[in-house]
Image (cartoon, rainbow, N blue to C red):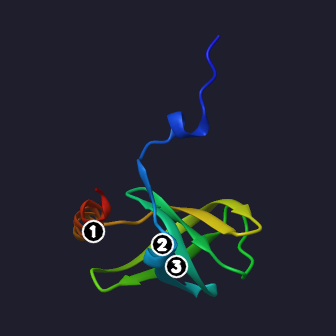
């Protein structure tokens, strides 16, 4: 019997950002502010003090000098530090912009 870790089951690789590279994130529906500490092509983790609910659909905007990404996402995980969200509505141009940005973050 094998045991798969959560990392093994993930569809997308994620990038853990050092604190000095956290990305600014705002929510427009519901309104919230936070910092992105983990990002990948499938979603991100936003550190926020505002309460988000599992399964909730949110609209968010991530801003960096090299990326502005506005999209819809679904809250997949919530803990005391923030929420993990899955992108649910990335069209082809936004997917390309995100992939280009992620390439700049990888060593």
Q: Which mark is residue 72?
A: 2
* Of the image marks 1 and 2, the number of the one nearer the N terminus: 2
Q: Is residue 14 left or right of residue 26?
A: left
Vertical placement of residue 27 versus 21, above or below? below
Q: State which quarter of the image contains the C terminus.
A: bottom left
Total numbered labels placed on residues in the image? 3
CA gap, disc 3 to disc 1?
20 Å
Do labels 1 and 2 touch, CB within 8 Å? no
* Percent position of residue 40, x then y: 41, 58
Q: Secondary structure at mark 1?
A: helix
Do labels 2 and 3 touch, CB within 8 Å? yes
CA gap, disc 2 to disc 3?
4 Å
Q: Please tell me which residue lies in front, 20 or 99.
A: 20
Residue at figure coordinates x 62%, y 74% from the top left: 47
Q: Please tell me which residue lies in front, 68 or 92.
A: 68
* Percent position of residue 8, x then y: 51, 34
Residue that protrudes farthest toward the top in the picture: 1
Q: Which residue is mark 3?
A: 59
Q: Is residue 22 left or right of residue 65?
A: right
Q: Is residue 1 left or right of residue 107?
A: right
Q: Secondary structure at mark 3?
A: strand
Q: Which residue is mark 1?
A: 101
Q: Residues within 10 Å of mark 2 (few under 14, many from 20)?
A: some
* Percent position of residue 89, x then y: 41, 66
* Of the image marks 2 and 3, the number of the one nearer the N terminus: 3
Q: State which quarter of the image contains the N terminus.
A: top right
Q: Residues within 10 Å of mark 3 (few under 14, many from 20)?
A: some
Q: Which circle, 3 or 1, is nearer the viewer?
A: 1
Residue at figure coordinates x 63%, y 86% from the top left: 32
Res 13 visible: yes
Q: Please tell me which residue lies in front, 11 or 72.
A: 11
* Percent position of residue 97, x then y: 24, 70
């Amino acid at each position: 019997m094998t045991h798969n870790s959560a990392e093994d089951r993930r569809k997308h690789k994620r990038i853990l950002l050092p604190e000095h590279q956290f990305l600014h994130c705002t929510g427009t529906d519901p309104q919230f502010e936070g910092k992105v500490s983990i990002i990948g092509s499938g979603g991100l983790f936003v550190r926020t003090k505002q309460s988000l609910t599992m399964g909730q659909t949110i609209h968010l905007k991530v801003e960096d000098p090299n990326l502005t990404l506005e999209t819809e996402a679904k809250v997949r995980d919530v803990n005391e530090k923030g929420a993990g969200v899955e992108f649910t509505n990335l069209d082809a141009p936004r997917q390309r912009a995100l992939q280009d940005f992620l390439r700049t973050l990888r060593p």
